[in-house]
Amino acid sequence: MDLISIIIPVYNRTDRFRHTLSSALGQTYKRTEIIVVDDGSLKNTVPFVIKDLLKFHNYDASIEEDSDALLRIENIQYYRQENKGAPAARNRGLELVKGEYVIFWDADIVAKPEMLQKMYDALQKNPEANFTYSNYGLWLMAYGLKQMRAQQFNFNILKKNNYIHTTSLIRRKDIIKWDESLKRFQDWDYWLTMVEQGKKGVWIDEYLFNITGSGTISGWLPKCAYKKPWRYFPWIKSRVKKYEEAKKIVMKKHGLL
């Protein structure tokens, strides 16, 4: 059985991280290593959650600490750095992986127990694919659970809008680094870069995880908000402007303007 490396960048919000880590520990696919990169959270809060959860799951929560701010607890590696943003935290995690497969598992993800197994099986059945992705649910305070359905892999459609979430399983040999200069649309930039290098994805038409809501995803707006007259409403206008400015940065980078 191949080793899957799970990279979880976390910055505060340990309440959500607790559910995230618990769902990673509860996967039916057991040959995993979990790499938690603490991106400058309040000191000691993330290690406390890790140790507490391991005790709950009946692991020995003893810790080995080395001089590189790295803790090793069972199959979990914990690394703390100063706050640099999620892309930098993911890149730091990449330096530590040992698995044949890698998944960037955001700290607001609660996955179904069979998620990794289904993603792994999809790549075994599709050896020509370099990564696999699925549908997901998004919890929004004003809307409840919104189903975010992806679609069949198509580069031309990807050029217009992203439909591949960060939390997707990738063959390690195909991994690239994240652009640390981007503040938004980091996932869209990542998949565009991958596909421009000849990489292909395979879609699992199932809802394999939910997002509890944090970071830029909490700024989600319905499609109608970007159209007239809604886009000019005072409480929407500034958010739409920031969205469009950030999108243009990525489009310019990939020659899509």
Image: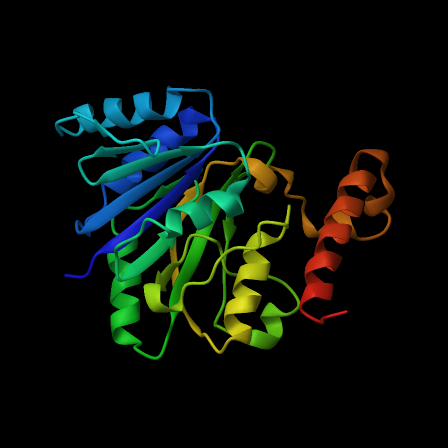
Quarter holding the N terminus is bottom left
In the image, taking residue 127 as reference, residue 146 lies left or right, namely right
Q: Quadrant of residue 232?
A: top right
User: What is the residue that sits farthest to the front in this orientation?
Assistant: 67
Camera sees residue 44: yes
Q: Position of residue 256 (x, y in %)?
A: 72, 71
Q: Is residue 204 visible?
A: no
Q: Nearer the viewer, residue 163 or 198?
A: 198
Q: Residue at (80%, 33%) from the top-left corner?
A: 235
Please, is residue 45 above or below residue 187 in the view?
Answer: above
Q: Nearer the viewer, residue 157 or 84?
A: 84
- Residue at 25% of width from left, 71% of height from top? 124
- Residue at 31%, 46% (x, y): give it: 112
Identify the coloring.
rainbow
- Residue 179, given in percent of the width and then of the height, sits at 57, 55
Tell how many labels.
0
Expressed as whole percent of the image width and height from the top left, the position of residue 99 reads: 26, 57
Foreground: 115 or 59?
59
Image quarter hosting the C terminus:
bottom right
Horizontal arrangement in the rendering, residue 239 relative to residue 156 (left or right): right
Q: Position of residue 97 (x, y in %)?
A: 31, 52
Q: Residue at image x 37%, y 51%? A: 95
Quarter of the rendering containing residue 78 = top left
